[in-house]
Amino acid sequence: MALKRREKILLVVVLVAVAIFLFDRLFDTPMNRKISMLKGEVKAADSKLAELALLSKGLETAEAEIIRLEEELKGLSERTLRGEEFRAFLRHLARESDPLQMKVISISPSEEKISPSEEKKESVLQDSRKVAVHLVLHSTFAKLESYLKGIEELPFLVQIEGLQIQRNDEIQPLLKVTLGLKMYIIAL
């Protein structure tokens, strides 16, 4: 039985179709699945890389903030009085008065209790005490101004809590000044 030309062409076409079908089923489809799976893995890896880049940028920002805060803490601890410096500070307060224009009547330091809410905020200053100094002095306005500027220029953290000025006939031309100062002292 001889095949006619038309049947031969049809047989070749069927063989080519079967070959294409087998190629698609055995080679192309598994490769496409592998390629799509690899593309998914690449996308996942890219998203993880982007996440890691953001985390590393966040870490750099956090490290810079930590360095800034450490410098700030260092500056605060440098400006916080220690025991011996506190005595020098009290001597400075007493010595700065000029006998003709200013007279220190009393200097009374007293330790204050730190409230629990302040304790949390000031946990950085561990082993520290909050000390208030109450000064009473007789002075003129000009000398008082220069005295307060001298306190302000000290290299310590000193806070003026209260200032009361009264005219008193007994000590004319001087004024009675009551001054409250607060500071932290690190106990060593």
Image (tube, rainbow, N blue to C red):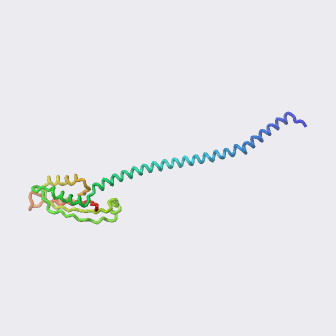
Q: Measured along the vertical axis of the image, is residue 176 above or below residue 2? A: below
Q: Position of residue 8 (x, y in %)?
A: 84, 35
Query: What count of labels does the image hold?
Result: 0
Q: Position of residue 5 (x, y in %)?
A: 85, 33
Q: Residue furthest top?
A: 5
Tell which residue pokes out farthest to the right in this image: 1
Is 143 left or right of 25, judged from the image as shown?
left
* Image quadrant in which the C terminus is located: bottom left
Q: Residue at x 66, y 44 (%)?
A: 32
Q: Nearer the viewer, residue 84 or 151?
A: 84
Q: Residue at x 51, y 47 (%)?
A: 50
The residue located at (16%, 61%) in the rendering is: 136
Residue 116: % across, % down? 34, 65
Foreground residue among 34 and 168: 34
Compared with residue 25, is residue 156 higher up or lower down, i.e. above or below?
Answer: below
Quarter of the image where the N terminus is located: top right
Q: Percent x, y for residue 110?
A: 23, 65
Instruction: Write down the quadrant of residue 169 in the picture.
Output: bottom left
